[in-house]
């Protein structure tokens, strides 16, 4: 993954504003933040999506996501909440194809909008999808 910008950041080839680093994980501030304190957490190794990350590596990564969220809640002025966003594939809005979690600080009435229009589903349809999906879990 020679061209991957997050691989380059992980290797220190591109500078970043680091928050946390260990052998496998890096957390740093987003260069174009949606809000002050907007943070990114990545595995240093290149994985495209959440489904590519080995199961055993998820726990440690999520622990850092939780820690960064805690830091955001203690430090960002006026912060009242946060979103954890993680997009997979271009169709879902993933721009950088290296697995990453966003932690985005929120304030009541801020201009960020991650809402969607609520759809409708018949019980039959819910059952159909649940039955198919349960077989894959
Ligand atoms: P996504 O749209 O989920 O793929 O998010 C990619 C994020 O990476 C965006 O929020 C960008 O602002 C952020 N980003 C891109 N380049 C850099 C960089 N060099 N340092 C820090 N954040 C970056
Ligand atoms: Zn990468």
Image (cartoon, rainbow, N blue to C red):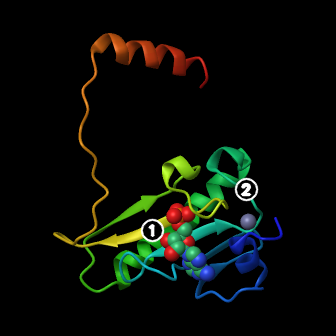
6 or 2: nearer the viewer: 2
Report the quarter where the C terminus lies: top right
The residue tagged 2 is 47
Q: Is mark 1 within 8 Å of ligand 1?
A: no
Q: Residue at x 63, y 86 (%)?
A: 16
> Is 89 positioned to the left or the right of 24 in the image?
left
90 or 28: nearer the viewer: 90
> Is 64 positioned to the left or the right of 26 in the image?
left
The residue tagged 1 is 103
Q: Residue at x 42, y 72 (%)?
A: 70
Q: In which quadrant of the rendered view does residue 26 lie? A: bottom right
- Label for residue 2? none
109 or 79: nearer the viewer: 109
Q: Is mark 2 within 8 Å of ligand 2?
A: yes
User: On screen, 121 above or below 18?
Assistant: above
In the structure shown, which secondary structural element does the residue marked by tag 2 occupy? loop
Q: Is residue 28 visible?
A: no
Q: Quadrant of ligand 2?
A: bottom right
In percent of width and height, residue 72 lies at: 40, 77
In percent of width and height, residue 105 lies at: 35, 73
Q: In which quadrant of the rendered view does residue 15 lie? A: bottom right
């Amino acid at each position: 993954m020679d061209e991957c910008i997050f691989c380059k950041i992980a290797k220190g080839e591109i500078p970043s504003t680091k928050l946390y680093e260990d052998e496998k994980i890096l957390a740093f501030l987003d260069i174009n933040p949606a809000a002050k304190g907007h943070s990114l957490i990545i595995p240093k190794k290149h994985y495209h999506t959440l489904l590519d990350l080995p199961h055993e590596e998820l726990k440690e990564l999520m622990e850092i996501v939780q820690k960064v969220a805690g830091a955001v809640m203690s430090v960002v002025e006026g912060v009242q909440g946060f979103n954890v966003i993680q997009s997979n594939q271009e169709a879902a809005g993933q721009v950088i194809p290296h697995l990453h979690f966003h932690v985005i600080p929120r304030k009541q009435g801020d201009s960020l909008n991650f809402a969607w229009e609520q759809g409708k589903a018949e019980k039959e349809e819910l059952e159909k999808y649940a039955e198919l999906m349960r077989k894959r879990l």
